[in-house]
Image (cartoon, rainbow, N blue to C red):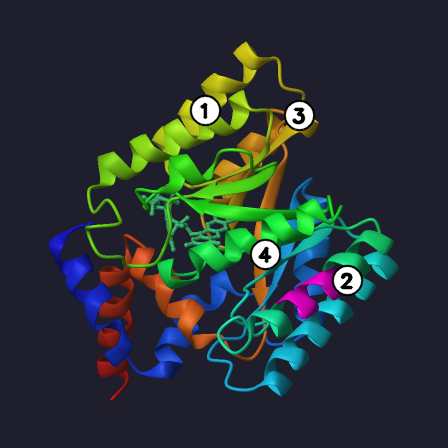
Amino acid sequence: MALLDRAIARVLPAVPKPLVRALASPYIAGPTLEDAIAVVRRLNGEGKLATIDVLGEEITNDGEAQEIARAYHRVLARVESEGLEANISVKLTGLGLGLDYALCQENLRALVEDASARGNFVRIDMEDSSTTDDTLRLYRELRAAGHANLGVVLQARLRRTLADAQGLDNVRICKGIYLEPPEIAYDDAEQTRESFRATLRALLDQGSYVGIATHDELLIEDALAQIPGRGLAPTEYEFQMLLGVRSARGDELVRDGHRLRVYVPFGTYWYEYSVRRLQENPKIAGYVAADTVRRLARR
Ligand code: FDA
């Protein structure tokens, strides 16, 4: 990212919310489940799978966690009744992890059972490093209890990730969005890439199902080079991308016969997710500047 882009990315929290909302609109399906369903239908029509995220952060009580869980049950029901190709991605803090481990476990177990009854699947997103141990523990506990329709996420940015990969059956590997201290995380882009590549290899070596979640061309190319030598069928791995990011590259992957799953967030708590996405957009400075010029010209 250029210097100006980095500077703008840092001050994004000071940018007016309506502007953040407008700039972030390509990354979010919309406020309602109907919006998410319409986007998933379009993606399925393009040969892409989806994973649906109910946006919700800063849970402060059990009721809010249960409300998010109920929203996910509604998603599972709609996906089934519409015959769509979409699973769900959940954040454990949204299901109550920060309040009470047992509450979160219960909410997650109920979702995994509901998904299983509908032939569907639950992916646990990975949040900041304060949640890594509990997230992996919850994943392992439920898998050990026989719930095979559950997957987790590893973040290449964390130094512990290659070791964590051992024995995990179903993993999304990504770089990791949360800023972490250098004692536990790489702050160098190339080291993060190397960790991504090494973890992907380790996962494929042990026969895990891997969701390769990146828009980084170097990492996509590396993953593509791994597939033929291992004799993997297109159903034995998938690429994953975020809604609104590099969709033309996603089209190419689909055309070349790979599975691609797109992360589709929806809901009214759009702000935090939008800021994270905009901070990663290499063209953000240009967009903010162009919008500012437009508004000044209108005055
Ligand atoms: P990188 O950020 O280097 O981007 C590579 C290129 O992609 C850029 O140069 C640009 O061209 C394009 N690009 C990337 N972001 C863009 C944007 N917002 N707008 C426009 N262009 C953009 N993280 C986490 O901590 N926990 C999680 O559970 C998940 N889950 C998850 C699911 C899926 C399906 C994806 C794709 C990603 C995640 N992530 C995540 C986020 C992930 O950790 C990471 O922050 C982003 O994917 C960006 O990293 P890249 O590997 O794409 O590389």
Q: Which mark is residue 267?
A: none
Residue type at numbered disc 4: Leu
Callout in the foreground (1, 4): 4
Rendered location of residue 60, percent (x, y): 50, 86
Read off the residue under disc 2. 76
Measured in 3D between alpha carbons, the distance from the residue under mark 4 to the one under mark 2, in whole angstroms, is: 21 Å
> What secondary structure is found at the residue carrying circle 3?
helix
Query: Extreme left residue here?
Result: 3
Measured in 3D between alpha carbons, the distance from the residue under mark 3 to the one under mark 1, in whole angstroms, is: 17 Å
Is disc 2 surrounded by few (<14), some (14 to 19) or many (20+) residues within 10 Å? Answer: many
Rendered location of residue 296, percent (x, y): 22, 82
Q: Which mark is residue 201?
A: 1
Of residues 75 and 47, the one drawn nearer to the viewer in this rendering: 75
- Give yes or no for contact between labels 1 and 4 (Cβ–Cβ under 8 Å): no
Residue type at numbered disc 2: Leu
Q: Which mark is residue 138?
A: 4
- Per the rendered image, the range of residues in magenta is 105-111
Q: Which mark is residue 234?
A: 3
